[in-house]
Amino acid sequence: MAADTAARAAETAAHHGGFDLLPVVILLAAAVVAVPLFRRLGLGSVLGYLAAGLAIGPYGIGLFSDPQAILHVAELGVVMFLFIIGLEMQPTRLWAMRGEIFGLGLAQVGVCIGLLICVGLALGYPVAQSFVAGTGFVLTSTAIVMQMLEERKSMGLPKGRRIIAILLLEDLAIVPLLALVAFLAPGGGSMSMMDRLAGIAAGLAAIGGLIAAGRWLLDPMFRLLAKTRAREVMTAAALLVVLGSALAMQAAGLSMAMGAFLAGVLLSESSFRHQLEADIEPFRGVLLGLFFLGVGMALDLATVANNWRLIAIAVAAYMTLKTIGIYVIARLFRANHREAVERAVLMAQGGEFAFVLYAAAASVGIIDAQASAMLTAIIIISMVLTPLMSILHDRLMPATGDASMDGVEVAEGLHASVLLIGFGRFGQIVSQPLLANDCSISIIDTDTDSIRDARQFGFKIYYGDGGRLDILRAAGADHARLVVVALNDREASVKIVKMVKAEFPLVPVLARAFDREHAKELIEAGVDYQIRETFESALMLGQQALTTLQVEESAVNDILADIRRRDLERLNVEIAGGNVGDAARDLMYGNIGRGDPGKH
């Protein structure tokens, strides 16, 4: 009845020449109702979307009859997610991850393929079908894992980066796997070498073209558009880059997600990176939710009911063997037990790329339509089970030192003349002269224990990650007269300085530096003032040493001024790319040639 009503509404809208809003309203309503409910129950947003999709799909109350149409559009959410991840992966950082991508990632994919092929063989299926079914399940759901990493705030942690590296390898693996499917097809072995070489050449040409465009065209294009001061044009350009890159990769036989990721990497060092991230984020969130809704709708309950024993055995066998394979490889690559278990739980499911692989196998006759429907159901059920397994994992193996948000307020709508990021031993001292001068100051930190402890000493600290643009806005960075970065994390402090100078260029930024190299990085990031945490305190100790040796005060002041001048000259030489060794020898006082201390 509901489906008939929706169809009549669509016919009425079409008859009157209007756009049919009913499906859009239903999708939004399902998400708005289900996701908060499931999150309130502690089941996570992913499971909420999946359940809502199942409820309104053809095997629920039947408000939608073609979930594949929604999935095709919603895959753009995964594409945009990969673009945002790419924006966080500078080429140097990606190069540093090459061992994890092609070492850890390749090892996990290879071992899991070997294990999962055995499931089909044990159930009596031919080698080709067993291979297709097993390799499809090896390709983890990028959308689900990324969403769960984001909810766990693990994206930027080493364990999160290792999972991302594996997912990148799996994205790359879809290309040779599709080629193997074509080879295993009846008559596939007759494909000429020229056809294979042409396919490889097309893929390499697409990657090369995208790299060339990213290096010489994208940044100048955004610089030109920025001069128009039309925000909507910048947003349209961002979408054009993401979708155009995805389309180019798809046309070359590669994955759309890989194209978007490469575009993000190429723009990761652009001065417009943070603006692009802010423009794409709303689209990514909505479309990713739509993707999960589509996956829930696509679960064919009739196929599950008719083949429930075989599907149950396959889901249990695939997930168990994949979990074992992931855990073993993680331990071999020196991950601790806790990280290996968490990775195995998060990546135990099949993924959206399996749908592509199974469709390709069905089109060349390796599997029939019934087998494709069963394999798709197996993948979707594993996706549904993953959030439940994650909840079970968190209850049976709670992470050590998990941050509790009890008594902690999140930064939101703050307004102060000074924003202080980081309230460790350094930030506490920085705050004192500001507060003594009655400056209004907002302080954010991510250490919930420190936030709670600070209250008893008269400090109001808000929870917030200064490395996120939305948090900086919520903490009042766009209204502040000054931003002070006092974090105990050198990489995060450089990232924050770059972000603030890119998004709020008129706001001065002062930062704590760990050493000379870190000071150089901060200066190159655009910091207005930096101070090495030990520099002035060491000079003060040296000053007291001279005073104790009864050196005249005027001479002491001249010596300290000389030391500061020499240090600044040396730093300028290093920033300009000069010879560090020569600068150190010429500008630092050494004790060689000043007498042998042991002979006095």
Image: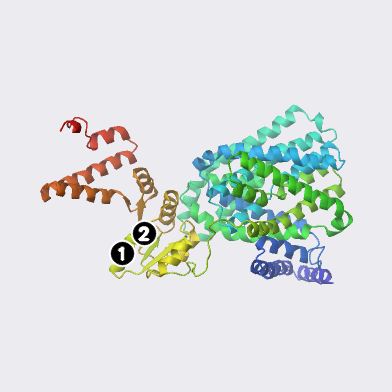
Which residue: 37% across, 70% down? 458
Q: In this figure, which residue is indicated by the disc labeled 1? A: 432
Depth order, front residue of 300/246: 300
Circle 1 crowding by C-alpha within 10 Å: few under 14, some 14–19, many from 20: few
> Could you say where residue 519 lies in the image, as x and y percent from the top left?
35, 47
Depth order, front residue of 599/150: 599
Q: In this figure, which residue is indicated by the disc labeled 2? A: 427
Q: Tell me the kind of residue under disc 2.
A: Gly
Residue extending farthest top: 193
Which residue: 28% across, 64% down? 433
Quadrant position of the N terminus in the picture: bottom right
In the figure, is residue 436 to the left or right of 240? left
Which residue: 32% across, 35% down? 580
Element type where label 2 sits in the image: helix
> Can you tell which mark lies on residue 119?
none
**Is there any visible trace of residue 391 in the rendered image?**
yes
> Could you say where residue 537 lies in the image, as x and y percent from the top left?
27, 51
Circle 2 crowding by C-alpha within 10 Å: few under 14, some 14–19, many from 20: some
* Vertical comparison of 147 with 89: above or below: below
Element type where label 1 sits in the image: helix
Residue extending farthest right: 306
**Which of marks 2 and 1 precedes in the sequence?**
2
Quadrant position of the C terminus in the picture: top left
* Vertical comparison of 562 with 595: above or below: below
In the figure, is residue 317 to the left or right of 82? right
